Structures are given as C-alpha cells and as structure tokens.
C-alpha cells in the first residue's frame, strides 16, 4: 500500500481521526478494467457496500479520488446512534407509526452491524457500547422531550426519562432521555479494518482515482474505463445526477472542537441537545458530544454543532471561524474540566427533506445505485446504505429497501419545503452582490475572496508566495455564485453544497468538474 498523503481533503483542517491514523492510500487506477460491481467513494457508505459484496463473493472495485476517509467520514464524530437528529415524533408525523418503527429498527441494525464487524474482523477501533443522553436546548420545551420519549418507545427504542443529565455541569437538575446500547469508535481505524477486509476478500481498491464520467456501463476514471454490471455512487452527494436528488436534500456545514480531559473525569457516553428552536435554519442546529481514548492520562472531549447552511454563514453574521469560539464556550460551560482546544475541523451533512436517507436504485436507472441524504446520522445511514444496496444487487429482499428508496415520494412539512426551496432560489441573488472585496489588492496571502469584475464573478485566492489564482466563481453545477470559506479555505456553493479547494479542484458534488481558470490582471 502506498502510504503517501493524497492532496485532496474536504478542507484545510485535519480532523483528530485523520491526524491520529496512517493515511489510507492505495495505488491509483492505471489501466482499463472490468468488474461485477464498481463502487465510487471510499467513505463509510462505499466501504460498507464493498465489504458486504466482497463477503458475498462478488467481484468489486472501489475507487476514491482522495484517500480512504478523505471525505465527510474522516471528519465525522462517529456516534453510532439510533437517537435520530430529526426526532422520532417528527418522523412519526411524516411517515406514520409503522414506518417509524422500521426506521428505528434499521438504525439499531446498523449499530449492531458495526459492532459485529468490529468483532468478526478483529478491528481495533476503540469500539464501545455506551449510553446516550438527549437533553433540552434552552429554546425547547419539556413537552417536546416527553413527546420524543413516547415516540421513541413506540418505535421500539430502549429509552428512559432521567431527572438529571449524567456528567453535565450546566444542565444539572434537568430532564433527559437515556438511549441504551449506542456505539462509538475511531472512524479511521474502522475504515482501515473494512478496507483490509475488502482486499483480503479479493476486492480491489484504488485511491487518487477520480470518476469523471458515470453511466450504465461503468465509469471513466483517471482516463481509464471501468466496465461494470452494477455501479454504486457512494460519493456522499451523488455526482451522477444533476438535478433530481439535489432538490430533496440541503447542505449544512457543522463544526467540531476536541480538547484533552483527564481520564476518568467523564464516563464514555454520547450527549446531544435538542437543537436551537429559534434558529433561522430548518435543520435546527444542535450540539453533540462524546469522549475518545487519547493516551494513558487523557481522553479527548469531542463536541460539535453551530451548523449553518453551506456558503451562508454570513447570513447570521457569524463567520465560519467564529463558530469554534461559540462551540468552545458552550462546551466549557457544560464540561468545565476540559483543557485547551487541541483539534478543530468542520464538515458537511446533507439534510433530506423527509428525514430519511436516499438508498437504492438511482431514480430512472436499473443498475446505478446511490447512497445519500446522510444527515447527522450518516454513520448509521451510510452503514445501512451498504447493507441495503448489497442486498438489492444480490437479489435478496431487504425489509428497509422501500423505506429508503430514492424514488419514493418525499413528504415534508409544507412550510419546510417552501422555505428551503426559497432559500435555494434566493442564492441566485448573489449575482447582484458587489462581492467580498473591491480589488485583488485587498486579498491577503493565504486568503481568498469573491470579486465582481464587470458582470463577471471571480473566485480569487492569493497563495503564500503572493501568487494570485483566479477562477470563475460560477458553480459548474447549476450556476450559483460561490462563497469563500475562510475557515476551511475552500470555495463553497450556497445552492447544493458543491465545494472547491483554493486551487479550484472539486471536493464535494454535485458539481463534477473543477472551477474554470480565468486570466485576470491585478
Ligand atoms: C462534523 C461531522 C460530524 C458528524 N457526526 C456524526 C455522528 O456523530 N454520527 C453520525 O451518524 N453521523 C455523523 N456525521 C455524518 C457522517 O459522518 C457522514 O454522513 C458519513 O460519514 C458520510 O459517509 P459517506 O460514505 O456517505 O461519504 P464520504 O465519507 O464523504 O465518502 C464519499 C467519498 O467519495 C469520494 N468521491 C467524491 N466524488 C468522487 C469521484 N467523482 N470519484 C471518486 N471518489 C469520489 C470522496 O472523496 C469521499 O471520500 C457527521 C458529519 C460531520 C461532517
Ligand atoms: S451546487 Fe448546485 S449550483 Fe452549485
């Protein structure tokens, strides 16, 4: 295995997981080839699919354009939970009681699958079975917590109401719901275990291998053809489809800090609040916390939250970088024993309109499959993706296939749909904005900006050697104007979440191509 770090990541900051593991790089594809199943994407969804199929004796090739885990999986916090971030009572309103019970069972199955795979494949990824605690955000009501408790129990989830939140300083004396038998682990060690197992079972993995054209015959990657009977697009945001799926899910950025805390101060557990009900965003941002083993003396307290729609941080007048300070303040109040912040990073989640991921045949296709709509439950959704898609390909009936079918009629609260659709449409108004700065001279070394030049929008990045890199700021997907993300040093699209490095390379779909270079004089 080639251990060199690839140059494609989903942002400037390295997560704790990536920083504390060897780069998972394989050889790039260098020849035409063929296989029964081609899987595009080396995150938890793609690798779980590859693992399930290779175990069933199928011939599989997995390609990944960065390293394994260089997408959102490497930036997760890896709570393996059935405490769903869209709330059971909401899912019940949208889908009814029977389907909600199926949803709960499917996420519990995903947790059991991860725990079982860790055991069967002997993966050293610090997997732990832990309790999780859902407590009220100050803007939420106890009635909602009670509603959630009742709905979760109706769905068959092991829950209890507690009169205090274990280990939380600032929330003493408040109610919470305990979710039993949840999981947590080190995601990169888990992905390595899956990748090792795939290779041992005869599967092939290629990294630094970008799929540029995907159709029913396979894909073109690095200029070579891969012919396949089945093609699984596990790229988080599907890159095979321009329109259909991207009106049914919405991209959000979410932020993480990690700080050392003396071992034994806190029990290994998961904590979540119920989200800011006053937030302007439909996906009410919530906080999520866990511990991870660090060394003999310390654990790492890992806290996340402060989400906003991609490319729209400024709409709340809270720049991306300021989100870490807010998160730190929130976490320190509740976990005062935590030390200095050792790691910080952010990532992206796709919030599906009706709270369920999209897993199965791509609408209109017979042999192309997608796994997307991860939401904050992408560890279980991604795992389910692997289980469901591999069953469909093998012709085995799967009890959850219809539930997650990408072609299902997506229902939502009407207001939510209208608001998200209006937000998407409003982003085209950025064409009229004057830009971040008036001239290139204002862009400092290591920074980027969007500038208006006549009727054109230009994405500018000035490197440390003072060299200017200039691209069209028009998103190659459907033409929205990109925004500069000063925190992860990327150009982000506020419409459907495509993202590009400061060198103009595409890192998140649905866009499939890099930004167009333009020649502009300073
Ligand atoms: C900060 C953060 C915290 C989170 N916390 C949790 C949590 O605690 N619990 C939970 O359940 N979920 C959580 N999630 C969500 C979860 O981590 C993700 O949904 C999940 O990891 C996504 O996995 P994936 O395989 O779908 O996508 P990815 O991991 O993004 O994998 C897709 C891969 O496809 C590759 N790719 C893209 N285009 C191409 C192409 N054209 N050719 C080749 N390769 C390509 C990418 O490089 C990428 O590696 C969190 C997410 C974030 C960002
Ligand atoms: S991601 Fe759709 S226009 Fe940019």
Image (cartoon, rainbow, N blue to C red):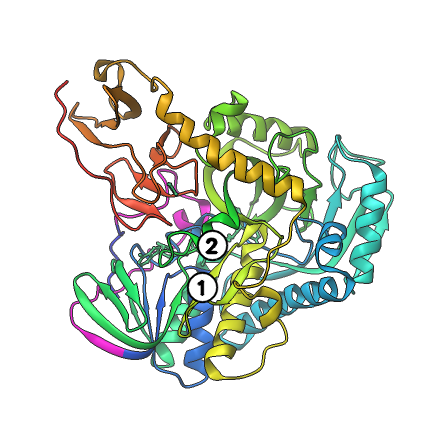
**Quarter of the figure that contains the N terminus:** bottom left
Tell me the magenta residue range: 7-34
| Mark 1 neighbour class, 10 Å CA radius: few under 14, some 14 to 19, many 20 or more | many
295 or 453: nearer the viewer: 453
The stretch drawn in magenta includes residue 59: no
The prevailing secondary structure element of the residues shown in magenta is loop
Mark 2 or mark 1, which has the lower sequence index?
2
Which residue is drawn at the image coordinates 75% and 30% (left, top)? 139
Residue depth check, mark 2 versus mark 1: number of the one nearer the observer: 2
Residue 501, image x, y percentages: 29, 39
> Taking 64 as reference, is 202 above or below it?
below
**Quarter of the figure that contains the C terminus:** top left
> Taking 430 as reference, is 296 above or below it?
below
- Check disc 2 and report the residue beneath it: 245
Residue 436, image x, y percentages: 34, 19
Residues tagged 2 and 1 counted as in contact (Cβ below 8 A) = yes
- Check disc 1 and report the residue beneath it: 370
Q: How many marks?
A: 2
Q: Is residue 255 visible to the viewer in this orientation of the structure?
A: no
């Amino acid at each position: 295995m080639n251990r060199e770090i690839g140059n494609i990541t989903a942002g400037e900051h390295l997560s704790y997981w990536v920083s504390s593991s060897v780069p998972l790089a394989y050889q790039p594809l260098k020849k035409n080839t063929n296989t029964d199943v081609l899987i595009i994407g080396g995150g938890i969804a793609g690798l779980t699919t590859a693992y399930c199929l290779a175990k069933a004796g199928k011939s599989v090739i997995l390609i990944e354009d960065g390293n394994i885990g260089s997408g959102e999986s490497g930036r997760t916090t890896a709570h393996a939970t059935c405490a769903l971030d869209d709330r059971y009572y909401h899912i019940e309103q949208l889908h009814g009681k029977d389907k909600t019970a199926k949803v709960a069972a499917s996420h519990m199955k995903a947790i059991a699958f991860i725990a079982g795979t860790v055991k069967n494949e002997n993966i050293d990824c610090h997997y732990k079975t832990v309790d999780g605690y859902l407590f009220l955000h100050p803007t939420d009501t106890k009635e909602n917590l009670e509603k959630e408790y009742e709905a979760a129990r109706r769905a068959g989830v092991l829950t209890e109401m507690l009169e205090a939140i274990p280990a939380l300083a600032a929330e003493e004396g408040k109610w919470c719901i305990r979710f039993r038998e949840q999981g947590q682990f080190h995601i990169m060690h888990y992905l390595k275990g899956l990748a090792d197992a795939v290779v041992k079972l005869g599967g092939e993995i290629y990294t630094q291998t970008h799929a540029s054209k995907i159709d029913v015959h396979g894909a073109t990657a690095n200029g070579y053809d891969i012919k396949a009977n089945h093609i699984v697009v596990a790229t988080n945001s599907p890159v095979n489809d321009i329109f259909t799926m991207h009106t049914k899910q919405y991209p959000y950025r979410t932020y993480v800090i990690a700080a050392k805390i003396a071992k034994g101060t806190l029990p290994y557990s998961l904590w979540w609040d119920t989200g800011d009900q006053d937030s302007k965003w439909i996906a009410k941002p919530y906080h999520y916390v866990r511990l991870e083993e660090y060394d003999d003396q310390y654990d790492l307290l890992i806290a996340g939250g402060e989400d906003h729609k991609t490319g729209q941080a400024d709409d709340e007048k809270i720049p991306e970088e300021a989100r870490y300070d807010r998160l730190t303040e929130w976490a320190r109040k509740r976990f005062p024993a935590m030390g200095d912040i050792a790691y910080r990073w952010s990532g992206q989640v796709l919030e599906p309109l009706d709270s369920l991921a999209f897993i199965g045949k791509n609408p209109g296709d017979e042999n192309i499959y997608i796994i997307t709509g991860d939401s904050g439950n992408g560890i279980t959704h991604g795992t389910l993706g692997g289980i469901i898609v591999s069953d469909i390909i093998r012709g085995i009936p799967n009890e959850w296939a219809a539930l997650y079918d990408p072609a299902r009629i997506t229902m939502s609260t009407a207001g939510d749909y209208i608001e998200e659709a209006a937000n998407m449409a409003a982003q085209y108004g950025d064409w009229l904005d004057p830009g971040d700065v008036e001239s290139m001279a204002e862009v400092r070394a290591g920074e980027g900006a969007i500038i208006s030049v006549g009727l054109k929008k230009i994405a500018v990045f000035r490197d440390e050697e003072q060299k200017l890199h200039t691209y069209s700021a028009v998103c190659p997907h459907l033409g929205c104007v990109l925004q500069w993300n000063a925190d992860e040093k990327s150009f982000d699209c506020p419409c459907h979440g495509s993202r590009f490095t400061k060198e103009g390379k595409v890192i998140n779909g649905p866009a499939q191509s890099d930004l167009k270079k333009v020649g502009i004089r300073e």
